[in-house]
Amino acid sequence: MRWCTSLRADPWRALLVLVAVCYGIVQLVVVTPAMGLGWDEVVYISQVDPRVPATEFIAPRARGITLIVAPVVAVTSSTEALRVYLCVLSAVALYASFGTWLRVRSGPAVPLAALLFASLWLALFYGNEAMPNVWVAFGAVAAVAFFLRCMRPGSGRGPAAGLAVSVAVVALLRPPDSLWLVLPLAAALAIPAWRQVKAGIALAAGLVAGWADWIVEAYVRFGGPAARWHAAGAANETGLHFSLHEHARALNGPLLCRPPAHCGPVVLPWLLWWSAIPVLVLLGLYAARRRDRLAECALPAVAGLLLAAPYIFLVGYAAPRFLLPAYALLGFPIAHGALWLVEGPRRRAGLGLVAAGLLAQFALQGLTLEKVVGQRLSKRQADVEVARALGVRPPCLVYGEHAVMIAYRVGCESHTVLRWPQETTVPAPVRSAQSAGKQVVVVDKGRSIPAPFLLGWGRRELVGKWRAYDPR
């Protein structure tokens, strides 16, 4: 009852609630709980699913997303239940993270920034996926807000505690991202008026708490933090790169631009959308300076750009989800700029521009979301049907294309093949499984004989163009 009264007294909070509710509803209706699991999702989920073998957990990954999915996965193997849970949780996280900004400054900029982020096809698609990036975005949004609240005299311990928790959450999910998030916040403490010891302690405490699990696991499984960092860099192709063109090619729906995945060309409407972002951010910074609100626009803008920088300059491939935290933070200066356009004598023209921009945003994002969901829905459903047709039981190994997703459905171990071996000798994972007495099945889509070692194996036709090979 008290919460309802608060909403009536604060229309901007009520509007933010509406945005969060719509965000959850669109996920349920358009993205659909029937969406099967992707490769990365299976890796994260299998770590806490007691019914299946844990898929190999390589050096770059962190355990944060496994903690998020654990409450549901420990109880049920239902993908639909997991999707609904993540959908509701992401809608709550959207409200909670952006709602923190209403304590920085209440007004229409906050629900508008939330709307800009929530309407992205990326935010909608990944809101109920067991993937870390959208949760990093929520943590980053909350962290910057709590930091700004810490800068106010007499702010108390609450904002500092919130800052520490937000940074820790980001570090648990993607440890390197937390460093790029903390960098501009720590640099801001050098400003004489912002030298708050409690904020510095909160940043340090958040990093220590969030990195602890990654560091402990580094000693247990990878030979120490330095060895794990090196292994993670090798897996992610880190080094000096410039992948802006790859990110531009990924805007309209490819989930990954990394060989052997085909990414396609740059699409003009998306290039125009992307090119408008820096212009709108600069407009927002100008408007915020005119209103004496520069700090609350400049800090998320700088943090957003820094969170995007490593994926553009230090990673040799692109995935559109990498930029989700940047989009979330850049929404604040863009929202300030849009609201400035609808003020004063330019109100009528500004309203037209803002309305046209929002309609274009909804149309472009919606069409892309529908395309991405349609493609993934059919591909992931095929994995489920192949798993049902395999006829294997644990202990077993599934080797071949989409092996991780297929094996998860039947409780087998897996080894996914991106490039089939051309040697006649049986691959080491298959030999090891056979030596251990496990049933082995090789799966492949649409090839006559994908690898020489399968020439003497039995072949079965499965659903669609899928085939299974069994040792004789």
Image (cartoon, helix red, strand yellow):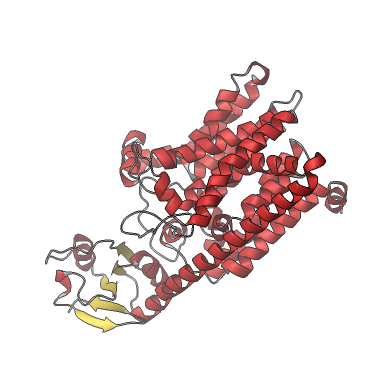
The answer to whether 186 is drawn above or below residue 145 in the figure is: above
What residue lies at 57% left-to-right and 46% top-to-bottom?
276
The answer to whether 221 is drawn above or below residue 372 in the figure is: above
Disc tally is: 0
Task: Decide which of 433, 261 is in the foreground and name it.
Answer: 261
Task: Decide which of 395, 35 is in the foreground and name it.
Answer: 35
Residue 263 position in % (x across, y down): 38, 58
What residue lies at 46% left-to-right and 61% top-to-bottom?
49
Q: Viewed as shown, does residue 69 lie left or right of 245?
A: right
Residue 239 position in % (x across, y down): 33, 37
Rendering quarter of residue 412: bottom left
What residue lies at 55% left-to-right and 60% top-to-bottom?
125
Extreme-left residue of the structure: 424
The answer to whether 386 is drawn above or below residue 436 in the figure is: below
Q: Is residue 292 visible?
A: yes
Rendering quarter of residue 432: bottom left
Task: Decide which of 55, 13 is in the foreground and name it.
Answer: 13
Q: Viewed as shown, does residue 437 lie left or right of 307?
A: left
Q: Quadrant of the C terminus?
A: bottom left
Extreme-top residue of the structure: 192
Q: Quadrant of the N terminus?
A: bottom right
Residue 327 position in % (x across, y down): 57, 46
Residue 27 position in % (x across, y down): 61, 64
Q: Is residue 160 visible?
A: no
